[in-house]
Image (tube, rainbow, N blue to C red):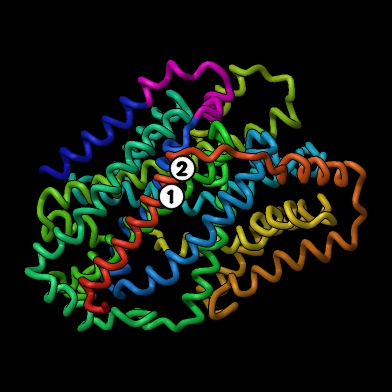
Amino acid sequence: MAIGLGIVVLLGIFVLISVVSKKQVKTNEDYWLMGRKAKWWMFAGTLSASYVSLATFIGGVGASWAWGPMPYLLFFTSSMTFGWIIAVVLIGLRMRKMGSESISDFYRQRFGDKSASLLTGISVTLAAIIFFYLLVQLQGGGIVISEIFGTPLYVGIAIMVAILAVTLASSGMYSVVLTDTFSMFLFIVVGALLIPGTIIAVGSLDIGIGAVSANGGWSATGSSGLDMPYFIGYALAWLSIIGGSPHLINRSLIVDTPKSVVKGSFVAYIITMSVTLCVFLASSMLTAAIEPGSMSPDAISAFASANVWPKMIGVLLIGGAMAAAFTTANTQTITVAQGFVDVFRFSLKPNMGEKQLRKLTMIVSVLVLVLVGAFAAQQVWLIVIASSLAGVIASLGFFPTLILALYWKRLTVKAVKIMLWASIPIGIFMIATNTLWGWFAPFPTVYSYPIGFGGLVLISLLTKQTEAEKQGYLFMREKGFTKKPQKVEKSDYVTIIAGLSFMAILFFVLNNMLGTL
């Protein structure tokens, strides 16, 4: 009952924040980019909330219980670390300096091309990548609601869709950023209390660590039974998802100054790494209370919250899971919607008024939520499969085009269009044949990376670069790579020293606890 009440209160807070912040939305820039007014701490909030998804609180908890903590700590966390740097610093920061309003706008500026074929290709690819990841968020949130309240899965998903639609229609990016920042504080509380709560639940620290050891959880691949090449390929898939993550890149465009991107991302990284470390270690100790293999890993969070962890911990963790599903889903939905709206405002109907564009964004957002929700209600998708497909599609087209667009002068827009449009059918083929017959072993991303980058290079060398493309590259280098002196303030030093000190303390505490120091 307490967990159910906690979920109701949490969702009510999200709706209240969104409705109250509606008065701040006066222009399209406010709706899409929060008017570029986000301070570094707001950026830290939305970035960490976008990073901590159900892959952490549902998938990560279940996988750590089933396999031990090391697979997720080594591969999931490391791939996200490098992906984070690529998405926020190498890509997002450049776009912010260029004044880009969206990812489609960046491509338009970079190649001097606003054709429907390019913009639609970007939009469809973004939708394909985010579709499977958004599917997980809606279904995961629906599973939590159905488990806690005893409703059918489709009812839980419908509740998620309805509340997301209301919040996005109310205030767009203001809703996203403010609810994300609220969720960040919830994640911090969960991370701080989860290990002590788990120790209390299983009886003692020695019992918890002993259970992990008995389950073979301390090796690099844990008790998964999967070999190292699989996990390397899985890490590459997540590197593509995060490194070219549209909703993370878009976060870099909302800040007031480029400096806020760097400062906010540093703080967000400290928060998310601390939270995920604590979640994965605590979850692996649950084998002392829940027999390994006794249930589906996806059900562990809800079951442990209701039956194992102290009630307050259970309420906070399920609340964190719901917040993670909600905040990741809202960023992904508005990113997809904006991509399709860009086709209209840049190519098909460039004379559309601000109100029309905003209304179109709201309509597309609702349609995206309803469509994905309908798919999510049909069957349970494994998180690993859904995210893997998104990663393969991203590594075939979207991720390589972003990297080469920034760092290779010779890239042509024809190559970009071909690889973007081809990435979806090729990605589906690779994942389907890998799942059914074991093709592209050990993992499809081992092949999709060279195909994606190689295809772009080969096609670019075989096609002629236009004058608009050359000018677009020069514009990008001039604006996106400019180095303006940034005033370093006392608070900046305090933030850096405090963050590094906290991570050092956490490192020594956890290693001491595990007996490795």
Whole-number angstrom distance, CA of label 1 to CA of label 2 = 6 Å
From the viewer's perspective, tell me whether residue 126 is left or right of residue 371: right
x%, y% of residue 219?
34, 82
**How many circles with numbers are drawn on the protein?**
2
Query: What is the span of residues highlighted in magenta in the rendered image?
Result: 18-37
**Residue at position x 53%, y 73% in the image:** 233
Per the picture, the main secondary structure of the magenta-coloured stretch is: helix
Q: Is residue 220 placed above or below 371 in the rendered structure?
A: below
x%, y% of residue 398?
65, 54
Q: Is residue 91 placed above or below 334 in the rendered structure?
A: below
At label 2, which amino acid type do we have? Asp
Quarter residue 455 falls in: bottom right
- Per the image, the residue denoted by label 2 is 492
Q: Is residue 89 placed above or below 161 in the rendered structure?
A: below
Q: Is residue 430 found inside the magenta-colored segment of the image? A: no
Q: Nearer the viewer, residue 353 or 279?
A: 279
**Residue at position x 11%, y 58% in the image:** 307
From the viewer's perspective, tell me whether residue 462 is left or right of residue 50: right
Q: Is residue 387 placed above or below 451 in the rendered structure?
A: above
At label 1, which amino acid type do we have? Ile
- Per the image, the residue denoted by label 1 is 496
Label 2 sits on a secondary structure element that is helix
From the viewer's perspective, tell me whether residue 355 is left or right of residue 191: right
Q: Residue 91 carries which label?
A: none
Mark 2 and mark 1 in contact (Cβ < 8 Å)? yes
